[in-house]
Amino acid sequence: MTLKYLDFEYSESEDGAGTFDAMASTSPLQVALVHAEIALVLDWAHTAFPGLRGPLDEGFEWDFNLQGLQEFTAFETLTYNEDTHRLNVTASPPGVPRHTVTLSVTGTPRFAWRSGSSSTRASFQFALEARTRRDAADSATARQG
C-alpha cells in the first residue's frame, strides 16, 4: 500500500529548515482514507522524533499544521436580459461536499534530512508498511481474544 491521496512538495528556508506540504481534496467517500494517510505520516514523525514536536524557534525538531475545509458547490445558470441590461442568476441546490485537507510538516535540517526530502513518499512507505503489519497483528489478536 502507498500514499494515494497525499502528494508532498518540499521547500527549504534559508536556515535549512524543511517543509513538506500536502493537500488532498476529495469527495466524502475518500475522507477516511485521507485521514488515515495523515495519521500515518504523523505517526511516523512522532515515532521517528518522539517528544521533539513543538515550535522550531523554541528548540524543537519538528512541528505540523493541519487544516480542513468542507465546500459545497452550487452550479449557477447565467442569462443576460437584453431589455434590463442585467444578468439573471439561477442557482441549483448544493451538491455533494468537497473535503479539502492541508498538512504542513516543518522540521530542522536533521528532520528534513531524515524525512528524505528527495522522496518523501518513500520515507512514509516504511511507516505505512509497519502500520499495516501492526494493524494486522492487532486484528489477529482481537480475533483470538
Image: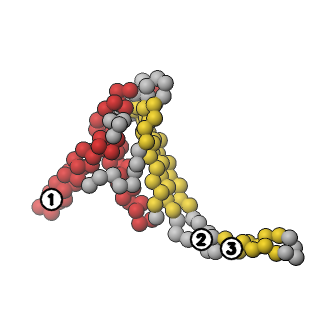
| Residue 30 in which image quadrant | bottom left
Residue 78 position (above or below residue 64): below
Residue located at (35% from left, 37% from top): 118
Measuring from the top left, give residue 14's x and y in whole percent. 49, 24
Mark 3 lies on residue? 77
The reply to whether dot 1 and dot 3 touch (C-beta < 8 Å) is: no
| Number of marks | 3
Point out the tag, 1 or 2, that comes first from the N-terminus: 2
Measuring from the top left, give residue 27's x and y in whole percent. 46, 64
Measuring from the top left, give residue 23's x and y in whole percent. 46, 50
> Spatial distance from mark 1 to mark 2, Cα to Cα?
43 Å
> Spatial distance from mark 1 to mark 3, Cα to Cα?
55 Å
- Tell me the kind of residue under disc 2: Pro
Residue located at (48% from left, 28% from top): 13
SS type, badge 1: helix
Q: Is residue 43 visible?
A: no
Point out the tag, 2 or 3, that comes first from the N-terminus: 3
- Tell me the kind of residue under disc 1: Ala
Q: Nearer the viewer, residue 125 or 101?
A: 125
- Tell me the kind of residue under disc 3: Thr
Residue 46 position (above or below residue 79): above
Mark 1 lies on residue? 140
SS type, badge 2: loop
Q: Residues within 10 Å of mark 2 (few under 14, many from 20)?
A: few
| Residue 140 in which image quadrant | bottom left
Residue located at (28% from left, 38% from top): 47
SS type, badge 3: strand
